[in-house]
Image (tube, helix red, strand yellow):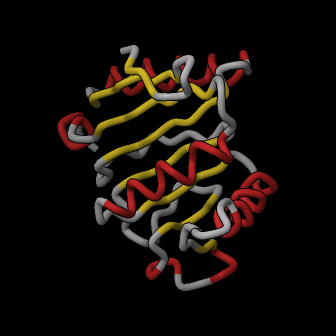
Amino acid sequence: MSQSDQSACEVLFYQLDRQPLEQVLPSLVEKTLERGWRAVIQSGSQQRLEALDTMLWTFRDDSFVPHGTKSDGHGEHQPVYLTTDDDNPNGAGVRFLVEGADTSQFEGYVRVVYLFDGRDKDAVAQAREAWRQVKEIGCTATYWQQGESGGWQKKA
């Protein structure tokens, strides 16, 4: 894959300091769907993937995020697909990487979004390494951190 193919991708890094993943991820995925994009959520472990699967159905009393996993089948029809692999059966334009998930595949995505726990030294170190790699291949990268009020502030 050439550098120019990958540089069209925008990579966003979200450092979670004030709210856990379970509060941040659903709203980001909802915004993705509102834009007409499909999404893939890649988790670093099967156990965490199963917890996210349940959470996306129940995170609010009046709403849910429509999604599926490999075990549900019909991945190509899912607006949001949950996985632990680099697969993209639904042709998603946005890939969310959570709980230590990583990718070297940026081609074909409008956005790749890293969400990491800012209080976890290993997660921060992994995000820094991912940032370095993303910049090295020429993708546009931005770094977001939660402010005192819980809103997102662009830091880099």
* Quadrant placement of the N terminus: top left
- Up the image or down, 122 lies above or below 65; here it is above
- Pinpoint residue 50: horizontal percent, then vertical percent: 76, 62
Q: For residue 35, which quarter of the picture?
A: bottom left
For image coordinates 61% across by 28% down, the residue present is: 16
Q: Residue furthest left?
A: 4
- Up the image or down, 79 lies above or below 3; here it is below
Q: Residue furthest bottom?
A: 74
Left-right relation of 148 to 108: right
- Up the image or down, 81 lies above or below 121; here it is below
The tally of labels here is 0
Q: Nearer the viewer, residue 14 or 121?
A: 14
Left-right relation of 140 to 134: left
Left-right relation of 48 to 156: right
- Pinpoint residue 68: horizontal percent, then vertical percent: 60, 74
Q: Is residue 129 visible?
A: no
Q: Is residue 62 visible?
A: yes
- Pinpoint residue 114: horizontal percent, then vertical percent: 51, 36
- Up the image or down, 37 lies above or below 121; here it is below
Q: Residue furthest right?
A: 47
For image coordinates 51% across by 62% down, the residue present is: 87
For image coordinates 64% across by 23% down, the residue present is: 17
- Pinpoint residue 103: horizontal percent, then vertical percent: 50, 42
* Quadrant placement of the C terminus: top left
